[in-house]
Every structure is written in C-alpha cells, then in structure tokens.
Amino acid sequence: MASSSVIADVSLTLEAVLTRAFSTLQPGPPVAQVHDLQGAISTAPARMTIFLFEVVEDASVRNRAPLREVAPPNLNLRKPQVPLVLRYLMTPWGGDRATEHQILGRALQTLHDDAILSGPQLLGGLAGTNEAIKLKLAPLTLEEHTRVWHAVQRNYRLSVVYDARVVRIDSDDVTPRPPVVSRTLGTSIGSGA
C-alpha cells in the first residue's frame, strides 16, 4: 500500500542515495539535500540540492479498472492508484565550478547506474515494499530551465532534471460488495418468431 507520504519517501530516498554516492568525493564529502531553493544555500559542505518542482499524473498508466480486494465476507472494490511522475531539479553548490562539476558528474553516474531504485534502497513508507522507482534524465531546454529558475526567483545555475516514475498513491475510496448468496434463474415463454 502506497500512502500519501510516498512523495516525501521518494525525496528522502534520492537524498540518501546521492549522499552515499558523494561519500568518496573530496574535498568534503558533499551531501545531497532536499531543498526548496528559498533562502541562503550553504556551500560548506558542498551539496547538491534536490528540488521537487513538478508533480504530474502519469498518463501512460491512467484509466485502470478498480482493484479487487478480498476482505471476507465482502469483496471490496478500490479505486485505482494515482500514478505520478515527480520532476526534480538537482543543482550542485560547491563554491567553485570544479567542485560543482565533480558533484554533478557523480550524481549523473550514480543515477545512471542505479536508474531503478528498489529493495533496501527505498526509505520511509517504501521500505520493505516491492515498489520500484525508475529515474530518467529529463531533457529540458535552456528556456524551460530558465523558467524554473525564474519561478523560484534565483539566478540560473547549471542543473539537471530527473523524472521519478511511477510513484503511486493508493486511493482511500473503497466500495464493499457483499458476496452473492443466492441466485434466481428465470425463464419466459415467448411467441417464437
């Protein structure tokens, strides 16, 4: 069951995966930090901010039939899960370009090697589930990047965008259906034509 905390759980998982990957980098090591890009961003230690800037429904897995759940003596029908794509802006902050490029390169390498996060990598409510989060580098144009930076009222910085999919949130809308306990058969005699 994917609760409504799944968005926070994916962000927490990304933060942990990247911080672990940065542990071998020098100087530092840098850290990954979920951040809203508001206020001052420290470069001691160097870091990569993870900013969730867009949440959209994944149209490729929409319009599914209700889920059937057996809960004796009833059969419950649950609305299908809400399939989401989470879009993250990831930005290195290191105080100097060489450090920022090193952080960016390590993040790209890690998210390429671990493009599917599952099992023990998942944290929060996703831990111990059979969920898998697929990460994909999203091709944004310079203009699209600039719009994001303009929206958060900051100057443009070198950054990458990743899509995390398919993140699912379970519906709380459950309709119990009582079991069939009898049936009635009917016949009619008609005029055969």
Image: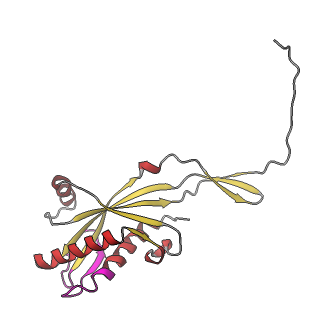
Q: Quadrant of the C terminus?
A: top right
Image height of 47 relative to 2, above or below: below
Residue 89 x, y percent position in the rendering:
26, 64
- Furthest toward the front, the residue is 113
Q: Is residue 43 magenta?
A: yes
Residue 104 x, y percent position in the rendering:
21, 73
Residue visible at 48% across and 74% down in the picture: 119
Which residues are drawn in magenta?
20-46
Colour style of the rendered protein structure: secondary structure
Residue visible at 19% across and 57% down in the picture: 145
Q: Is residue 56 magenta?
A: no
Residue visible at 88% across and 20% down in the picture: 189
Residue 80 x, y percent position in the rendering:
55, 52
Residue visible at 47% across and 50% down in the picture: 61
Image height of 40 relative to 136, above or below: below
Q: Quadrant of the N terminus?
A: bottom right
